[in-house]
Image (cartoon, helix red, strand yellow):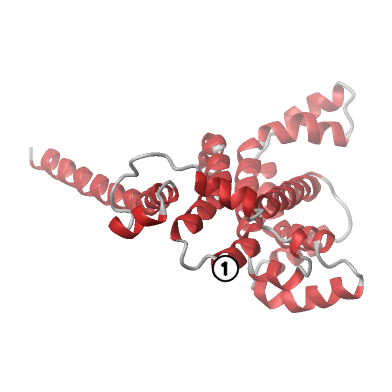
Amino acid sequence: MYYQAKKVIILIFLHTFLLSVALSCILPFVWMVNVSFKGQAEFDSDYGLKVATQLNWKNYKTVLVEEKFWRYFFNSIFYTSITVFLIVLISSLAAYSFSRLHFPGKNVIFFMFLTAMMIPLPAGFVPVYVLLNKLHLVNRTGYVLAMTNMGLSLSIYLLKTFFDQLPRDLEDAARIDGCNKLQIWWNVGLPLVAPAIAVVTIFNALNVWNEFVFASLLFTESNLMPLQVGLMEFSSKMVTQHTLIMAALTITALPIVLLYLKMQKQFVKGLTAGAIVG
């Protein structure tokens, strides 16, 4: 009886703690969305503490159309999609090579990637900017190449860990059926490491989508700026228009939230499998 009561008390305490953490993360987002549907006069009267009486879509129309916020939004969609695609493609090929192929200097090259993970990203911003400026690759192309490079080390390490755990019998069977190394990587390797690819996708999409310091340093043309830089300029211009700023923040946060909800199961599987492998 004592141990059952102790177990129940621990479970109640644990669930209460987890619920409080969840609410502390969700409530600010709910407040932001609620304010985004209010008029400025309504916000000034209750500071967003009351539920919006009606859905005021005018704020979103003003932000997207009149203030041309859609340019920054689609710029970020483009940069994030291309960068994440390149990271997944290159890191999966590299991780499969490090895991399954034998070539001179394999361990040295892999440890170089691990060493790169120890260098803080801001420490490389100025050298990368100078290099891209010398190559005349600032703005769009340089940003995609730089963000792709920054996401490769961790992605390769994570995917290699998963490739190492795959049974070689499946590869032997595919090889008997006539598959070459690329076909084995595509038809056997990638489907089996889908949870890890989901983790790589979400982590890198979040990094690229939220990058501000390097983006503000690299972009010189306003029409090519990503969402975070555009949001900074927008908020400084609309400093007293809180409802418009909340609408812009909702537009900024929504794609990442939808991406996580879409890949939630694969993301949890990837984290769990990675913990077991480690």
| Residue sitting nearer the eye, 260 or 178 | 260
Query: In the image, what residue occupies the spot 60% across and 53% down?
Result: 206
Determine the residue located farthest toward the top in the rendered image. Answer: 177
Image position, residue 139 (x, y; %): 81, 64
Image coords of residue 71 (percent x, y): 70, 52
Quick one: 69 or 132, which is closer to the camera?
69
Q: Is residue 265 above or below residue 209?
A: above
Q: Is label 1 in a helix, a strand or a loop?
A: helix
User: Which residue is located at x 83 percent, y 68 percent?
Assistant: 138
Q: Is residue 14 above or below residue 178?
A: below
- One can see residue 273 in this view: no
Q: Considering the image in quadrants, where does the N terminus appear?
A: top left
Relative horizontal placement of residue 99, taking residue 137 as reference (left or right): left
On the image, numbered disc 1 is attached to which residue? 237
- Residue 118 place in picture, x, y as percent: 65, 71
Residue found at x 58% / y 44%: 255
User: Residue 254 at x, y = what percent?
Assistant: 54, 45
Residue at 77% from the left image edge and 62% from the top image edge = 143
